[in-house]
Amino acid sequence: MAAQLQPLAKRNGRRRNTQLSAAINVIPLVDVMLVLLIIFMVTAPMMTVGVPVELPKTQAAQMNDSVEPLVVSVNASGQTYIQETLVPMSAMVDRLKAITNNNPEAKIYVRGDQKIAYGKVMEVMGAIAAAGFQKVSLIAELPQSPTR
């Protein structure tokens, strides 16, 4: 019986040195991290909804900008937001100047809920224009085409 076990313990006349390796195999870790990165890259743009505003519908042409503009929103209750941050009307102009570094050429889009009074949206646009910003635009939704 000892003769049968001997070839297993010896290899080419030498004894095998079997030591445990404490190194971490990082390949599965890298694979998991790449999958998570792809998931976050795909889902991140879907999560930038912003302030819930029901935009009016219009037939105007769609704008194609490569630079992301600054968005000021007015919700149905008349509250103003810069991007997703609630800002009182009295502090809005100062915040816009700070964010844009006093750049009058910065593009600012105004989103107004369709249920809000037209005067409130114009008040916001007027305050932005009076602060010296030259590129102020309104945002609306394209109407859905009827399905046949």
Image (cartoon, rainbow, N blue to C red):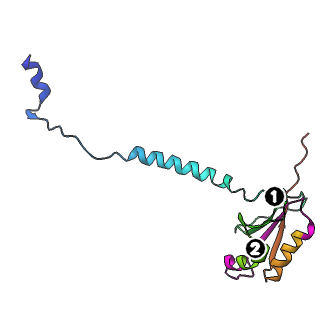
Marks 1 and 2, how far apart at CA: 20 Å
| Horizontal side of residue 35 vs 89, given as left or right | left
Residue 145 seen in the figure: yes
Q: Which mark is residue 53?
A: 1
Q: Which mark is residue 107?
A: 2
Rendered residue at 83%/82% (across/down)? 130
Check contact, mark 1 vs mark 2: CB within 8 A.
no
Question: Which label's residue is closer to the chain start, 1 or 2?
Answer: 1
Residue type for callout 2: Lys
Position of the N terminus, as image quadrant, is top left
| Horizontal side of residue 136 vs 22, given as left or right | right
In the image, the segment drawn in magenta is 97-119
Residue 81: percent from left, percent from top: 75, 66
Residue 83 seen in the figure: no
Mark 1 vs mark 2: in front: 1
Secondary element under disc 2, as helix, strand or loop, is strand
Residue sitting farthest toward the top: 1
Rendered residue at 80%/76% (across/down)? 135
Rendered residue at 88%/69% (across/down)? 120
Picture layout, residue 142 above or below residue 9: below
| Horizontal side of residue 83 vs 6, given as left or right | right
Crowding at label 2, few (<14), some or many (≥20) Cα neighbours within 10 Å? some
